[in-house]
Amino acid sequence: MDRKPWIEQIEEIVGPDHILTSDMDRILYGYDASLAKGKADAVVLPGDTDEVSRVMALAHRERIPVIARGSGTNLSGGTVPARGGVVIHLSRMNRILEIDLPNRTATVEPGVITLDLQNRLLRDGFVYAPDPASQKVSTLGGNLGENSGGPHCLKYGVTTNHVLGAEVVLSDGTVMWTGGKTHDSAGYDLTGLLVGSEGTLGVVTCMILRILRAPEAVKTMLAVYDSIEDAGNTVSAVIAEGIVPATLEMMDRVVMQAVEASVQAGYPLDAAAVLIIELDGMVDGMERQAQKIQAICRRHHVREIRTARDDAERAKLWAGRKGAFGAITRLKPSYMVGDGTVPRTRLPGVLKRVLETGEKYGLLIGNVFHAGDGNLHPLILFDERVEGELERVKAASSEILKICAEAGGTISGEHGIGLEKLEEMHFVFSEGDLAVMRQVKKAFDPKGLLNPGKVVP
Amino acid sequence: MTSPSSIRSSLESVLGPEAVRDDPETVAAHAVDGVPPRAVAFPGSTNAVAEAVRLCQRKRLAVIPWGSGSKMAAGFPPERFDLALSTARLQRIVDMDTANLTVTAEAGVRFKTVQAALSGEENRCYLPLEDPVTPSQEEICPERENRGCFIPMSPPHSRTATLGGIVAANSSGPTRLLHGLPRDLVLGVRYVTPAGEVVGMGGKTVKNVSGYDVTKLMIGSQGSLGVVCEITLRLLPLPERTGTELFAFDRREAACRFVDRVFESPLLPSAVELLNHRACALLGPEELDRPAGGTWGVALALEGVEEAVTRMRETFGKMGEARRARVRLQLEGEAHARFWERYGHLEETMEEAWPNLITIHPVYPISEYSGMAARVDALDAVCVLRAGSGTGRIHLLPPGADPEGPEKLLPVVERILEACVRTGGGLTVERAAPAWKARLPLWGPEPDALALMRRIKDQMDPDRLFSPGRFVGGI
Ligand SMILES: Cc1cc2nc3c(=O)[nH]c(=O)nc-3n(C[C@H](O)[C@H](O)[C@H](O)COP(=O)(O)OP(=O)(O)OC[C@H]3O[C@@H](n4cnc5c(N)ncnc54)[C@H](O)[C@@H]3O)c2cc1C
């Protein structure tokens, strides 16, 4: 293998143990949880901000692309080194630096696993609200990169509503802070721009997160339906009643069957859809709210409502939802997950068209979604070994995004654009809109070295 | 240099004669820091805004977007100022989608107008859905009990402020404690870039990671990156019950300990405001500041379901008693609404009474509020601190008829700034007479990322036509 001279310089910065250059490693870091692939020139595992900065300054001089990587669980090709370059894997920067309860902040390095922070905070009775289903593996840096959401975002908002400040290394190695421990700061909201920028504007090396007191009470219900429309109508009716639950999650039969085969959450196999409805907050009045919701469910022909009596039952109801993506591979070896989002009231109509699209292309589609905020996750199942199937999957997926865009929605709610949805950006943005995004990119990364070929077509 | 009359006539040719004014009165009413524009434009649509901006671009005219003018006193005096671009005719509420909990309105719509419209709007949902394929007939849910929605904001200047101005200043009030800042509540904007292009960012969904979140960049950009013309905001259903608990304490320490207890509890008030005695006298019912002087008041806004509000009232009442609150007042219905209305109108009240006022917006980590209260105690000021949000407003009163009055306030501002900076915060000066501005830290300490902010401005407004020189670092 031809050893590039800059590899030695990187070795000097991070030490020979923290750079990977074997063919195998370069291929391993060439993909993520999406279907895209690439090949890295080298993988670097820096230990602190200074090392990140020096590696990036070097890459800048040598004009080498830099790709930040957390756990690589993103579903859009966000960490695929599409044009080669250095992958900066932040797994060694995984310290929780400070938990400041009086100021309600947590200061962390980007490689901290989301669930590790959440578990640590629970010991003090606090929570970090964004809860992607991948929280056991995903990193907080990756959550920032994708502006991740989760079931509880209906009530608490997505990652961007919980990041107060960030230390960021720009493409030339400059280190700067945006925001801080305070909730306001003068000047442009650069933190807001960095969140969801998929590693294309800078590499975040430290972040200050907002934490909240854990809710006093939680009530989790599972509502079982014989028709998916009834489940969808329940969602609209609950909101119209003036109740905004913490979560309103939906799953259809295909997904339930896969889930049952893998985690046995106790979902009925013959139902058309289930809703997971969770209330949280102060205990007062929660029972009455729950009864109101149950009455709404009944008005919409619910078959059965189960209420979790304790934490164990609650965990079981959730296990199926959180394990849904993993479980789906029981039905077919591969799946492609969509992330289109529509105004909540358009869900039932859009859902129907999603299923029709599946039929049109002869593909099985399972549906899990954050119904409360109109975020669909159609799981298109397929077998890569069947010739032509991948092409059909891509065509179907793109068509579904078109449907979402036409319904007044957007092409990604929480998984990002990455490589996979570049073309579809045109469904929702005009050339003028994209030109503004390119200006943002130019201001941060004039040479275009950070995660090139992503987000903005 | 283009003469005023030629500015008017060229604008008239694109906007029509009714949309351009350069009479002395109109021009004077749109002066910024004493600098009058050469003309004022009142475009009636987003496209007309774009036309006007393209004209300014061609003629290199400096533009300052103008909402109701309530926040124009913030920032450095403009380096150049040719055209005030008023949003006064952008008055359409485009879409009230209460079933989806969003509202879209043009930038010139007053906050209070939308809020009133929303509270009366029947909650709609698309039921029943027999055939989900055809766009369903919008029907009013037959059995719903709840009516009405609201924008969960409580901005200052609440009677006059326009949506565009609130967004451009990321302006927030007491209930940000529970509901967040405009940056958390704005889902999308349509705006005109400095090049005169109409662009749309974000949309009607709460979740959206399609491309860069340019909406965030526009929020709080203070008119330096273009004209926000249309805004989509997140709504909430009107709560079942609302109310206010007011307490007064003889000693500041007792008030702070009470506030600490509130935050240690699992209860969720929507605002926890600490008021110095002058603020008590101005805002509260008379009893709040009697005997006058020395008092610190705490105002708690409550909203939620019946049971939760009842429990908060009881618990906070007991906490107040334990800290020997001298006064406890419970406001409901009209009295509750009036109290917070006065609150939202505090800025205007102050500005009318003390034209020489200096208003600052301190920023600090939330636990530092008690230190800030101690600092304020010694000042002649009307002060409300947003406990739990790490900010507040301090209106410094110039001493009497002393012509050197404001001069004496400059070191006071410096000291507050130092205190904020020591804790990792800063401040912004929201109002000061133009004559003092050069000597005040208008935007607080220089942000670490100022160079990057400049690069953004250079990319988006290379000719520096939008609010030139007014923003952070003279951007
Ligand atoms: C089974 C499964 C379930 C999932 N469920 C959800 C869900 O419920 N909600 C949801 O939102 N997502 C979900 N995802 C998607 C994914 O887990 C999230 O996008 C997650 O935030 C990615 O974290 P990561 O650490 O794996 O990041 P990576 O995939 O490594 O990186 C994500 C992006 O962020 C950038 N990045 C990483 N670190 C940094 C940094 N320090 N500075 C700057 N940029 C950086 C990368 O370049 C990349 O563009 C799921 C994925 C899977 C496989």
Image (tube, rainbow, N blue to C red):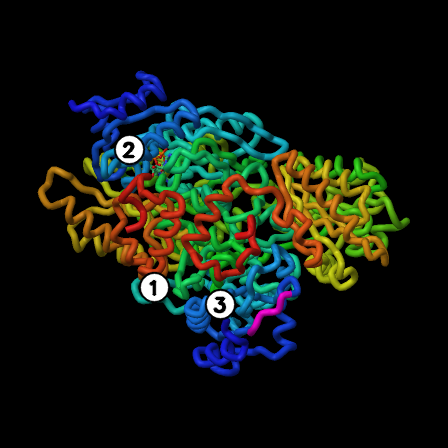
Q: B333 and A36: which one is in front? A: A36
> Judging from the image, what secondary structure is the residue with disc 3 in?
loop
Question: Eyeballing the image, is B288 above or below A318?
Answer: below
Residue A126 pos. (x, y %): 56, 32
Is residue B323 visible from the viewing direction of this image?
yes
- Check disc 2 and give the amino acid type: Glu
On whether disc 1 and disc 3 are found on a single subunit, the reply is: yes
> Judging from the image, what secondary structure is the residue with disc 1 in?
loop
Q: Chain of mark 2?
A: A
First in residue order: circle 1 vs circle 3:
3
Marks 3 and 2 sit apart, C-alpha to C-alpha, by: 42 Å
Question: Mark 1 — residue?
Answer: B130
Q: B220 and B443: which one is in front? A: B443
Mark 1 C-beta closer than 8 Å to ligand 1 = no
Residue mark closest to the camera, 1 vs 3: 3
User: Magenta segment, which residues?
Assistant: B35-39
Is residue B265 visible from the viewing direction of this image?
no
Relative to A333, A425 lies left or right: right
- Check disc 1 and give the amino acid type: Glu
For residue A62, the mark is 2
Q: Chain of mark 1?
A: B
Marks 1 and 2 sit apart, C-alpha to C-alpha, by: 62 Å
Does A202 lie within the magenta span? no
Residue at x 34% of width, y 63% of height: B130
For residue B61, the mark is 3
